[in-house]
Amino acid sequence: MPVTQIPMGFNMWNYIHKLSMSRRKGVRERQYDNVDYTQLTETDNGFVDSQFVSPPIKIPWKAITLATLLFVGGTVMLVTGSLIVSGHIDTKYSDRMWPIIILGALMFIPGAYHVRVAVQAYRKVPGYSFDDIPEFD
């Protein structure tokens, strides 16, 4: 079996390093002759500056609108139920008192919470962001 001689100036470690770092391996190397490939520098550490740039803030307008409607509707229902309880509205509607108060509370609580988060995020208070409000797609 004949022994193949290594040409002068051939550095085996350099060849292995370039081959392992290249996307062009083996026989298919000729297919990618037109691809621009630049080897990264050693001081790169795998980080790119653009990965540390935060994306623009997306405001969930649909969710804020729904939260505002819940807040206003819940407030109206709670006030109406309170006026029935206090007697400012005729007592003939007293059978509707508890359903109005319960529905008002169920609407007011999540609406008030999400409107508060939206206002604090708009004011850029630390700890609040528009990411805390769920989006509806």
Image: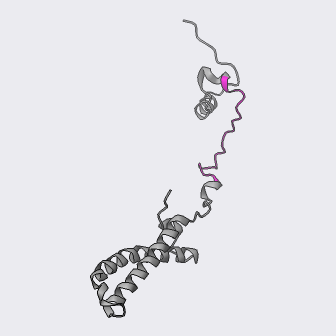
Q: Residue at x 63, y 49 (%)?
A: 44
Quadrant of residue 32 within the rendered picture: top right
Q: Which residue is drawn at 40% across and 86% down?
A: 79
Q: Residue at x 58, y 11 (%)?
A: 3
Colour scheme in use? one colour
In front here: 135 or 106? 106
Magenta extent: 31-48
Q: Where is residue 14 in the image (x, y as percent from the top left)?
A: 64, 32
Quadrant of residue 86 within the rendered picture: bottom left
Q: Position of residue 122 (x, y in %)?
A: 57, 74
Q: Is residue 11 left or right of residue 73?
A: right
Identify the main secondary structure in magenta.
loop
Q: Position of residue 100 (x, y in %)?
A: 34, 79
Verify whether residue 35 appears in magenta: yes
In front here: 86 or 50? 86
Q: Is residue 72 left or right of residue 94?
A: right
Q: Residue at x 67, y 39 (%)?
A: 39
**Residue found farthest to the front:** 92
* Viewport quadrant of the N terminus: top right
Q: Position of residue 51 (x, y in %)?
A: 60, 55
